[in-house]
Structures are given as structure tokens and as C-alpha cells.
Amino acid sequence: MFYAANKLYGITFKVRKDIPVYNPDVKVYEVFDQDGSDLALLYIDFYKRDNKNGGAWMNNFVDQSKLLNTKPVIVNVFNYPKPTEGHPSLISYDDVTTMFHEFGHTLHGLFANQTYPSLSGTAVARDFVEMPSQFNEHWALDSTVLKNYAKHYKTGDVMPQELIDKIKKAASFNQGYMFTELLAAANLDMQWHTLGTNSNITDVDSFEKIALQKTGCDLSYVPPRYRSSYFLHIWSNGYSAGYYAYTWSEVLDNDAFAWFQEHGGLTRENGQRFRDMVLSKGNTEDLAKVFKAFRGKDPDITPLLKNKGLL
Ligand SMILES: [Zn+2]
């Protein structure tokens, strides 16, 4: 993950042992820009603990702001098993993807270049914030990056090409089902939240049925990922009418990655362009225009469909 960031953005990392941490297993890195100037501090909290929330996330301890003269202090939290004496912590490919994902949010926070902290870095609309993170996941399977980290823990041998091909092939397994159940749920969410003020819904199940029919998502063999009566994202957790956001971000991240593939992939020039035109913008410009300026055209769904093996 650091290797990919170095190849793309020229940044480097140095462990700092003199900075206080909230748990002895937390690692702190100082992050340097290409010219050697310091950019940020990055805390990484890798391991599971009994009193720790599950899952993985990125957060800013301190937001970048020119007004307050602050540089970003960012934390990445994971729940990987802690290595024990003689047993390294071997993580799954899903866990690798998660690490690249959270680090994508980190890059968005690291390269922030804003005056106001409220517009800084990742403080963007929900349907854009997952774009840099999901975009960064793509580098986990880049052949140069993969050869740098996917090594046998005993022999040090690089992962054989047949296995890499298998991972790539397996990536499209069940994508049709998963994508359809997500689209059904996102459509349902949106329809609940676009009801007029005078609507009087008395039968939730029939509302749901009609809503799914309207959007062509009424497939008996692919029910929506969540039904209305227990779809927590619709009513609380702040997602109201925003469940579509991950999917929209996916359209953007696949399309942005397609730009890289069309322009020579993992290079400093490409990374710098993405940093300057997208990652450093925070919420200071219309994000649709930001994306369009980078991509050279409006977002296209084709790269997402290809990536899922649906085209
Ligand atoms: Zn995320």
C-alpha cells in the first residue's frame, strides 16, 4: 500500500516511535511529500482487541486546514489477528482490499489542501467519498504492486501467475446477484424518500412490491438486500435516500481507474494528475465537474460492468 502510494504520488513513510499512542500496538508514521517536506502523521491500529469495535475505518484526528495552520493527523483502524511468536498474521485477500480501501480515504485526507477544515479532504458528499477509497483498491491487483507484497511467508517467493489469474477470475463470481440486490435496495430507499407529503402508505409490503416493479428489480430469485421493515440504512444511520452512494462511487472509481489503464497505469505523472485534479480538492468545487475534468468526460458505467464481469 505504501509502495503503490510512492509509485503514484512520490510520498514516503517513516516510523516514529517518539509520538504518544493510545495502545502500544498502534504504529505512527510520518508522511513526507516528494520534496521531503512533511505532509502528515498516520496512525495505524492493525489488531483486534477485546474492547475494540469491529470492522475497519479511516478517521482524521486533526483535519488539514490553512486557516488553523494544521496538517492532517489520520488514523486507519483494522481488526487483523495479532501475530504471535513464530506465527505471522496472514491476512486474506479481502483484508488486503480493505487495507487499500482505508488507505484510499487516507490519501484523500493526506493531500487535502483547503483553507477551511469543514471543506477539507474527505468532507465531501456521500456519493463521492467512497470514490478515492474504492479507486485505491484497484492497485492491490496491479501486477507491479502485487509482486511487491504478495510473497510466500516462508520462502519469499512471489505469488505464481496461475494463482493471480485465479484471483482475478474469481472476482466476478456472483457479481450479478450482488449487484442486483444492491440496486433493488438502493431503488427502494430512494422511493421511500421521494414520497409526497400527502402519501398515506398503509401496506409496506405492497408499496415495496410496486416500487421494485417500477424499477425492474422485482426478481423473485434476487430479493432486495434489505426489506423495508428491517432496512436500517433507510431510516437511521444517516443514509436516508443515500444508499445508492456506494454504487455511484463504484461507477466513478472504475471509470477513474479506466483512465489510468488508458494512460499507462502506475506512473508518477498519472498519480500527480489524480492528486492535483481530484484528491487535493476536498469539497471546494462541484465534484461532478472535478470528476469530469479529470476523466475528460462524464462518468461512464461501462468500466464498472466490465470489472464485475457483466459485460
Ligand atoms: Zn470507505
Image (tube, rainbow, N blue to C red):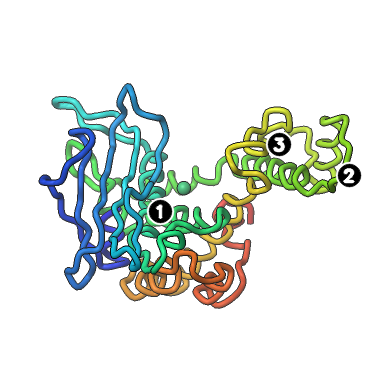
Residue 6 placement, left or right of 284: left
Mark 1 vs 3: CB contact within 8 A: no
User: What secondary structure is marked by label 1?
Assistant: helix
Label 2 beta carbon less than 8 Å to ligand 1: no
Marks 2/1: CA–CA distance: 41 Å
Q: Earlier in the sequence, mark 2 or mark 3?
A: 2
Q: Residue at x 25, y 63 (%)?
A: 39
Which of the 4 image quadrants contains residue 207? top right
- Viewer-nearest of labels 1 and 3? 1
Q: Earlier in the sequence, mark 2 or mark 1?
A: 1
Residue holding disc 3: 224
Q: Residue at x 32, y 52 (%)?
A: 62
Where does residue 119 sit, x and y in percent of width and height? 46, 62
Between 79 and 266, the residue placed more toward the observer is 79
- Viewer-nearest of labels 2 and 3? 2
Answer few, some or many: residues within 10 Å of disc 2's Cα (few below 14, many 20 plus, some between 14 and 19). few
Examine the rendered structure and indicate whether residue 268 appears above or below residue 235: below
Marks 2/3: CA–CA distance: 26 Å
User: What secondary structure is marked by label 2?
Assistant: loop
Marks 1/3: CA–CA distance: 28 Å
Between 287 and 104, the residue placed more toward the observer is 287
Name which residue type carries label 3: Pro
Residue holding disc 2: 198
Name which residue type carries label 2: Asn
Label 1 beta carbon less than 8 Å to ligand 1: yes
Label 3 beta carbon less than 8 Å to ligand 1: no
Residue 247 placement, left or right of 103: right
Answer few, some or many: residues within 10 Å of disc 3's Cα (few below 14, many 20 plus, some between 14 and 19). many
Name which residue type carries label 1: His
Which of the 4 image quadrants contains residue 136? bottom left
